[in-house]
């Protein structure tokens, strides 16, 4: 009878669940896993800091719409990962984090790295558990994988002590669960569909807002069909960007309040708002004044009650169902009943007019000698295709990027500080994971200089593992958003601890073996981007932007902080 260790068993369990790679950092607690990975075709992408491993699992999940897996050692390895886990929880990103730990016999006696890991993180996971039986490792992996994607998606954490991983058992003792879970996609009943349609029929200025559930539910086709069937204009938010092309005649691009773009007019003026799969949180102004107005009717269609329970404006209807299935059912009902919806042409014309005025005003700001983000992003868009991926990180840089980039296909945008935790600095590992998942696509990270520094050493990971991402550093010489906030709230003379100065980030990447270039003039933007992409190496373009220029979203955010009592 053959023997198998817990570490090898875990590798086999991951492979049986179609996991081909994991992100991690070696440590004593998890070495019993790592030493068996290559034997069974499990690739370990080894990073320089555990936080990056979690962010990479997060990025993998976002671009593949599958679970990303990270493995970290216990103690400080685990505590280093907490920000990434909480970020995934607050953004509803499904990841599995496997954490090593000390042996149970050393608990509560002063043993090395003895901490209550599950107790520390339980509140910010979909599910978390400790494994104390080697033979049950596959069972726990199967449960964790299911829980990460069921209901409201999010992270799960499994703690496995080192003795459980080193222990050998007879293979016949292993409990291999059958992976036969069938996820049924629910749609509303006929009565509910009729109520939705009646509300839409009565609307004069309806607006669709699409969110993450459309993306994770693979419902982009249903979304486009519903928009075209009804003729209702739409804005998209976060991972729904590109689920209907920004170039579509009825799509008015970014719907997130945070960017303070032309979407503010659409959100405020609409009389019926059809929310499909979006978590209404601070990114959407909590659906309150001044971004929204009294008297608006909300139809909220989300797969989990949690989303709908947080709506702060009284909805016309709350529907707990799969957004894609619901949209498809509505289209079928419209056809069956031969419903002719009214024309929204005058409403759409007003939206187009507002859009045109907004972009004319923004574009007029880009003509001075200092480098404007418009010039940088226009340069980037000259060298990327609809299939390529853009990652945004930072605050001021993120606001500019989310406002100015266009997306015409799903899964082409990753916003680093997504969700309600909003951590900066995760852009590099997110971009690395996006590139690993899409090796034939260009991956561009547009990041602030402050946010670049958090995980800058992961550019070594990029060089060492030959992951050619292109990083554009929006360098305003400071923690720019914090600086602007201090100026607004406390006065110019009281700005403190915000200045970073010119730092040769590009030379750091060069020293690691990548490509680097500094850009201080507008006429060098496009050549530098071309050089970086054509180099085929991990690259950093350090662009000195107009340091007195703040994105409309940053300005609006500061004004909201100023108004807080």
Image: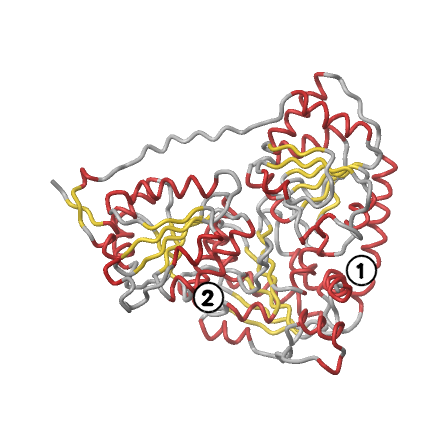
Q: Is residue 497 above or below residue 5?
A: below
Residue 448 sits in quarter: bottom right
Query: Is residue 183 in sight in this rendering?
Result: yes
Among numbered discs 2 and 1, the one appearing first in the sequence: 1
SS at mark 1 in the image: helix
Residue 58, horizontal then vertical, whole percent? 49, 52
x 80%, y 67%: residue = 367
Closer to the camera, 349 or 52?
Answer: 52
Q: Quadrant of the C terminus?
A: bottom right
Q: Residues within 10 Å of mark 1 (few under 14, many from 20)?
A: some
Q: CA distance from mark 2 to mark 1?
A: 35 Å
SS at mark 2 in the image: helix
Side of 546 relative to 92 (left or right): right
Closer to the camera, 561 or 51?
Answer: 561
Query: Is residue 374 in sight in this rendering?
Result: no
Q: Name the residue that disc number 1 marks.
A: 362
Total marks shown come to 2
Q: Name the residue that disc number 2 marks.
A: 458
């Amino acid at each position: 009878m053959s023997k198998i260790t817990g570490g090898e068993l875990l590798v086999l369990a991951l492979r049986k669940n179609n996991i081909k790679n994991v992100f991690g950092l070696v440590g004593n607690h998890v070495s019993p896993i790592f030493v068996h990975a290559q034997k069974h075709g499990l690739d370990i992408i080894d990073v320089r800091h555990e936080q990056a491993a979690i962010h990479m699992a997060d990025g993998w999940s976002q671009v593949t719409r599958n679970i990303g897996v990270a493995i970290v050692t216990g103690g400080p390895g685990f505590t280093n990962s907490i920000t990434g886990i909480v970020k995934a929880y607050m953004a509803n990103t499904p990841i599995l984090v496997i954490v090593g730990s000390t042996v149970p016999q050393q608990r509560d006696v002063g043993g090395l790295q003895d901490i209550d890991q599950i107790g520390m993180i339980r509140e910010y996971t979909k599910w978390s558990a400790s494994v104390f039986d080697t033979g049950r490792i596959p069972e726990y992996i199967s449960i964790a994988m299911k829980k990460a994607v069921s209901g409201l998606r999010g992270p799960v954490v499994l703690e496995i002590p080192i003795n459980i991983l080193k222990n050998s058992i007879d293979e016949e003792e292993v409990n291999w669960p059958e992976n036969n879970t069938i996820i049924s996609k629910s749609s509303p009943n006929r009565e509910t569909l009729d109520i939705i349609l009646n509300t839409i029929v009565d609307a004069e200025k309806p607006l669709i807002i699409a969110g993450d559930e459309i993306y994770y539910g693979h419902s982009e086709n249903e979304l486009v069909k519903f928009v075209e069937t009804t003729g209702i204009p739409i804005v998209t938010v976060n991972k729904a960007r590109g689920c209907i092309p920004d170039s579509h005649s009825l799509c008015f691009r970014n719907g997130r309040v945070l960017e303070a773009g032309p979407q503010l007019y659409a959100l405020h003026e609409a009389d019926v708002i059809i929310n499909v799969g979006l978590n209404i949180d601070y990114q959407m102004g909590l659906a309150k004044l001044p971004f929204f107005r009294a008297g608006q009717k909300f139809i909220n269609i989300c797969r989990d009650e949690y989303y709908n329970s947080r709506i702060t404006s009284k909805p016309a209807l709350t529907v707990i169902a799969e957004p894609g299935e619901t949209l498809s059912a509505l289209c079928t009902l419209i056809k069956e009943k031969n419903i002719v919806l009214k024309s929204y042409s005058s409403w759409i014309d007003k939206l187009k007019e507002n859009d045109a005025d907004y972009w004319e005003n923004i574009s007029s700001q880009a003509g001075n000698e200092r480098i404007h983000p418009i010039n940088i992003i226009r340069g980037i868009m000259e060298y990327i295709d609809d299939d390529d991926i853009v990652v945004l990180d930072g605050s001021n840089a993120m606001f500019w990027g989310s406002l100015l980039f266009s997306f015409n296909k799903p899964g082409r945008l990753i916003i680093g500080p997504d969700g309600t935790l909003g951590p900066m600095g995760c852009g590099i590992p997110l971009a690395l994971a996006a590139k690993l998942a899409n090796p034939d696509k260009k991956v561009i990270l547009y990041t602030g200089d402050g946010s670049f520094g958090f995980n800058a050493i992961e550019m070594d990971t990029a060089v060492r593992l030959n992951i050619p991402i292109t990083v554009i550093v929006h360098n305003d010489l400071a923690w720019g958003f914090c600086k602007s906030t201090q100026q607004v709230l406390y006065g110019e003379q009281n700005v403190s601890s915000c200045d970073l100065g010119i730092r040769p980030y590009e030379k750091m990447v060069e020293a690691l073996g990548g490509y680097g270039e500094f850009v201080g003039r507008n006429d060098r933007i496009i050549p530098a981007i071309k050089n970086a992409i054509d180099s085929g190496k991990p690259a950093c373009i350090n662009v000195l932007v107009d340091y007195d220029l703040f994105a409309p979203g940053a300005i609006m955010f500061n004004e909201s902080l100023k108004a807080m009592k």
